[in-house]
Structure formats: structure tokens, C-alpha cells
Amino acid sequence: MHFKQNNKINIKVRNLLFFFFAFSFLMNSSTVFAQKKYVIVIDAGHGGKDPGNLGNGYKEKNIALKVALNIGKNLSKKKDIKVIYTRNKDVFIDLWKRGDIANHAKADLFISIHCDSHTSNAYGAGTFVLGLRGNKKNLEIAKRENAAIFLEDNYKDKYVGFDSNSAESVIGLSLLQEENLDRSLAMASLIQNNFVFKLKRHDRKVKQDNFQVLRETIMPSVLVELGFLTNKTEGRFLNSKKGQEQMGNAISDAVLNYISNLKLNTVINNVVEGKEIVGNVEYKVQIASGKNKIATKSYNFKGLKDVERVSIGNFYKYYFGNTSNYKNVKQSLKVAKSKGYRSAFIVAFMNGEKISVQEAIKMQ
């Protein structure tokens, strides 16, 4: 009896010790991660010789700058965040240079701030991420914002083959940016939710389109249209100190929420790696993404069978060739490209969470 009691006590002690060490490890992982400096690049659209839109006499470049500085001021209060501005005064910055600043800084996030315009009395706030295709209406917005290219010196050399009136030019997309689409969508959704639910702005939703400034970046990136200066009421609000502070606060709160989620994911990954648990690694070939919900029948995908559809917010991604073997997925990529999916690429998941392909290969 005495032996059994000791056994029970030992088991309890072992369980308590295990809990203590697991908790300590989690806290230490969190502490280590908290020391990472998050680099956030804030881009105030237009500037200098490029005023942006001038709806109702307001200047987009000035409003974008004031909101950008407000976001930066809020974020700079956090010790683990480093803020970099593409411009902090009224100067003209080439579109390629804005992305270049973020890329060289190895930024974790890029946010470009703009105001919209329209010939109608349109109003409301919207947030954009880079996408493969856009409708005619969104294409017009992209063309307006991309027009700054023609104010740059030697723009023909910097943007070889670019034609602002060509859908093909505007819709060109780098695969590296597509890898970041999930996080860009997550960030955009947080911003848009704050606009709609906290500030009660009219919801113009999260959309995918083809802004040159987003194409230049290699990290999760969003472009925010704060509202329409051509709408008298909204223009007045955005030109006011109160409006600029409210919109800036909504964006900075969304960034802090986004970073908190990244921290949580990293802590979990650290614990998994600390226990040397590899988990279930899966590879897939992403063949398409967009807002259209398409039945995953082979005749809709050029004969490809077992296509998987995954919804992310209002968007859908289509995958082919699910496998745990990297060699097999490389073969599936060849098949997808032979069917005409030229921009298809490999993605990786561990226990359902997206990870980089390099990380997946290392784990295996």
C-alpha cells in the first residue's frame, strides 16, 4: 500500500514537472520571439510633383502622408516594431523605389496608403492585395495608381514592356508575391474589419488587383484606399485631423493584431520543433486563385483530376497533386504546366498550416 501511494505521488510530481518545463519552454519561446524586431514599411502614396487625386480640392498626397505618419507614430511605441517610411515629407518617390526600400529592409509587412476618386458620388474604404486578375472596375483603379510610373525618370528602362492600358501588363504577377497572398489577405481583412466595424465606414471590401507598388515587394503587402476625395462628405472627413487619426488608428490596430497572430504561430512552431515533432508535411501545386467558386471537376481544370478547392475569406485557391513526397509534387508541377497552368507553383503545409517549401524540405 505504501509503495502504491509513493507511486501515485511520483506520477503526480512527474506530471507537475512536465507541466512546469513545458510552460517554461513556452514562455521562453515567447520571450525569444518577442525580441524579434518587426519591420513595418509604411508607404504614403504619391508626393512631390505627383499630387495624386485632387477631388474637391483636397490633395491625396497630403492626406496619405498624414495618415502614414499617424500609423508610424502608433506602431513606434512598441519595442519590437521598427517603422520605416518610404517618405516622411512631401517628396516624389519612384514606384519601384518604394518596393526596393521594403525589400532591402527585409520588411515583414508593407502598407501603401491612398485615397480614391470617381466621377460618381462613390464612397467607402477598401483594401487591396496583389492578384492574378481583376474586373474592369478594379483595373481602372489600378491604372490610376500606376500612372505615377510615367512621372519617373527613365521609366521605359525600369518598366520594360509596361503599358498602363494593357490588362496583360497590369495583371503580370511574380510567384514570390503569390506565396505571400495568404498573409496579405489576412492583413487586409483585419484592416477592412476595423474600418467597417469600428469606424462604420462603407465597406468596399478586400479585393485583389494589380498595383505596381505591390508587385515590387517580396513580403506580405496591402494597398489601402481610405475613401473617396471626390465625395464631399468623405473628402471632408479624410482631410480632417480627426478623420486622419481615426483611419490611422484603425490601420495600426490591425497591424498589432496581425503581429500578435504571427507571434502566436511562431511560439507554437517553436514548441513543436523543441519536442522534435515534425508533423504531417504535405505538398501541393497551386494552379489558380480568385473570387470565382468553380466546381472541382476535371473538365473545369483541363483534365486535371482530384483538384482541391480551399476558401480564404472571399477568395478561393485551387490545388492539385496532394502528396507528402517532394519528388512527386515536382512531377505534378510539370503536369500542371503542361496543361497550360504556366504560373502554377509548389506550396507546403504542416498539419494544415502553410509553411515555406524550404522549411518543409528541411523538416523531412
Image (cartoon, helix red, strand yellow):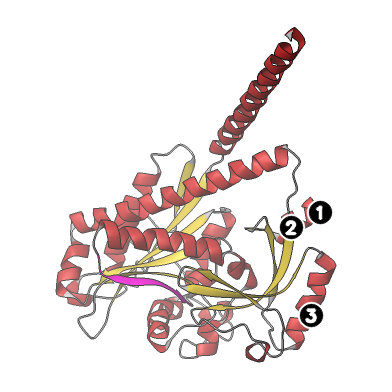
Q: Quadrant of residue 207?
A: bottom left
Circle 1 packing at 10 Å, graded few (<14), some (14-19), many (20+), is few
- In-front residue for pair 75/96: 75
Up the image or down, 67 lies above or below 316; here it is above
What is the spatial separation of the Cα atoms under label 3 and label 1, in whole angstroms? 22 Å
Q: Earlier in the sequence, mark 3 or mark 2?
A: 2
Q: Which residue is the site of mark 2?
A: 281
Q: Which residue is the site of mark 1?
A: 364
Q: Quadrant of the N terminus?
A: top right
Part of the protein shown in magenta: 201-209
From the top left corner, tell me how far across and down residue 198 is, in percent. Answer: 27, 56
Q: Which residue is the site of mark 3?
A: 334
- In-front residue for pair 200/220: 200
Up the image or down, 142 lies above or below 98; here it is below
Q: Is residue 262 left or right of residue 51?
A: right
Q: Is residue 11 left or right of residue 241?
A: right
From the top left corner, tell me how far across and down residue 39 is, in percent. Answer: 51, 49
- In-front residue for pair 39/132: 132
Question: Which residue is drawn at the image coordinates 69% and 90% (left, top)?
Answer: 302
Question: Which residue is drawn at the image coordinates 71% and 37% (left, top)?
Answer: 274
